[in-house]
Structures are given as structure tokens and as C-alpha cells.
Image (spheres, helix red, strand yellow):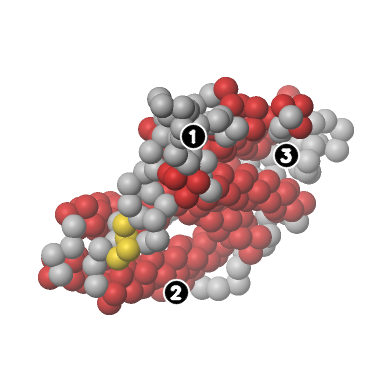
Amino acid sequence: MPNSLNPLELIARRWQPSAAFVRRAALATVVMAVIIVVTGGAVRLTQSGLGCSTWPKCTPESLTPTHAMGINGLIEFGNRMLTYVLCAFVGLFIIAARARHPRRRSLTRLGWAQFWIVMGNAVWGGIVVLTGLNPYLVAAHFLLSTTLLTVAVLSWQRAGEGDDAPRDVATRPVGQLAWLLVAATGALTVIGTVVTGTGPHAGDAHKVHRIPLNWQEITQLHVDFVYIVVGLTVALWFALRAVKAPATARRRVLELLACIALQGVIGYVQYFLGLPEIVIGLHMLGSTLVWIAVLRVALSLRDRGPLPEDGPADGDAPAAAADGEPAEPQVASASSR
């Protein structure tokens, strides 16, 4: 009965987005995930981390920042409001994925995973404020944003491929090398959050607790992992050439090398210039681009077949055959459920 249908089901009966639209909606969530990381960094680098003194309100008496709070309150509150924009883009992806026929439950699950990560990270951000920018919680806040970016990239990838069982396009050792590269890049990201937690930019003008480690030693460890990632990336490129892997995979490794090189230049610039805020912001942007690139490398080493062909909307009856016999069952639609 139509009255028993949920809103997503009703939309799916009236709107048939193209596969290209679903993929663009997925890409939009990737872009927004990057923006939320960069703007979150801007909050810290402008010393606006406690621009709103509490959560979920901005002050104990006001939901929004007051004039007396100045620019810091506006920056912190603006970053909170950006979460709603992010939710809107995630919601668009969920709706488009649900309305697309044949229905692909894997896409809607990825969309809902993004939504709940956003909600969880919003609450975590509130805890960060309430604990006075505890550096360990700030690091976890960034890593949750990286988790959101990971799911968004996976959604983007899945929106452009089929639902066949994954098939390796290179030998198993090459695939293992690719995932080792992903793991090393993940470790590099985690160490980067520790560098941030020991560094001078605590996120607020007042004294804020820092991670009690030597900043230069942690930075050197971070640099060491950069060399490990570079070495693994170069090794992977030669391995892909040796096994004559598809050109797409080799091209994505070169894209990753370009991102790493740019990020390395930015890293050395910020170190020798004494950590200027604008350069640190660029470094945070670079970290998201490196992570996207390394995920795309690993995901390029599998093939899941072509996208399912367009099928009828849920509940539509198959068209009858011209001679009056029952129509053939919609195999493509059924197999995708």
C-alpha cells in the first residue's frame, strides 16, 4: 500500500537519477569531507577552538555567538554550521542511491555510514570543546574525519562500478603491496596527529594542554614514515609495470607520487619557516589529497564489473510480452538486491 511506504521509497517511485548523477553526488560527499577537515584546521589555526565556550550551545545563554565573542566565535560557530551542509550532501547521496534502479543496497549502506560518522563526530567535537581541547581528543576528532573521507571515497568508487565479486587485476603480491602502502599512509596520518598534539598551535590563545612528547623527535618520526611511503609507492609502480597491470592503476600511482611530492614540499616549508598558519592549513589539505590518492590506488587493483543496467522502479510490473505471454523476470534488477 502506498500509505505504508517510507519517504525514500516514495521518492524512488517518482525520481530516476542517472548513474552519472549518483556518482557526482558521491563525489560531492568526498569534496565536503575534505572541506570539513580544512575548515576544522582553520578553527584551530585561528585560535578559535574555544570560540564557542560550550556545546551544543555556543555560550551557556546563547545558541549563536554574541558580538562580544568576536571573530573567533563566528569561526567556531561557522564550522559547526558547516556540518549541516555536509549532512545535506550526504542526504542527497543517500536519496539518489536509493532512487536509482536497480536498487543497490551497498550504496545506501555506505551513505548511511557517512551520516552516522558525521553525527558521531559532531558529538565528539562537542566533547573536545567541553574538555578544553584535550589534544588526544582533538587527534581522534581528526581521525574520525579521515574515517568519513575514507567511506566517502569508497562510496565514490562503488558508485562507478558493478556489484560482481571483486576480481584482482594484478597478482596477489602486488595487491598486498598496495594495501601495505595504505597501512603505512594510515600510520603516517596518525603520527601527524601526534605532531599536531605536541606542536605550538593548540587551537586557543589561552594555555592548552599538549601531548608531553618532544615535538622535533615526533616530527622526525613523521618524516621517516614519509620516506617509507615514498619507497613503497615507487616499488608499487615498478611492480605494476612488471606485471603489465592496467594503465589506470599505474596512472593512479603517479598521481599519488605527485601528491606526496607536493605534500613533502609543504611540510619542509612549514618546518623551516617556523610553522606559519597558512602553510599548516595547506599541509592539512595535502594530507587529505594523499589519503584519497592512496585509497584510489588500492581500489584500482580490483574489478567489479560494469554498472547494472537501468531497471524498473520498485513495484512496477514487468511489461507483458507482445503475444500475451508473461514477461521474463527482471534478472538484472533481482540480482542487484
Q: Residue at x 37, y 69 (%)?
A: 179
**In the rendered image, the vertical position of residue 227 relative to residue 129, given as above or below:** below
- Depth order, front residue of 238/161: 161
Q: CA distance from mark 3 to mark 2?
A: 33 Å
Say what amino acid the circle numbered 2 marks: Glu
Regarding residue 85, the answer to whether it shows in the image is no
Residue 319 in picture, x, y percent from top left? 47, 28
Say what amino acid the circle numbered 3 marks: Cys
Residue 53 in picture, x, y percent from top left? 76, 42
Q: Residue at x 21, y 52 (%)?
A: 248
- The tag earlier along the polypeptide, 2 or 1, is 2
Q: Secondary structure at mark 3?
A: loop
> Which residue is the site of mark 1?
326
In the picture, measured across the screen, residue 272 lies left or right of residue 50, that is left
**In the rendered image, the vertical position of residue 229 relative to residue 162, given as above or below:** below
Mark 1 neighbour density, 10 Å: few (under 14) some (14–19) many (20 or more): few
Quadrant the N terminus occupies? top right
Q: Disc 3 or disc 2, which is closer to the eye?
A: 3
> Which residue is the site of mark 3?
52
The answer to which image quadrant residue 90 occupies is top right
> Which residue is the site of mark 2?
217
Q: Residue at x 65, y 48 (%)?
A: 116
Mark 2 neighbour density, 10 Å: few (under 14) some (14–19) many (20 or more): few
Proximity of marks 3 and 1: CB atoms separated by less than 8 Å:
no
**In the rendered image, the vertical position of residue 144 relative to residue 47, given as above or below:** below
Proximity of marks 3 and 2: CB atoms separated by less than 8 Å:
no
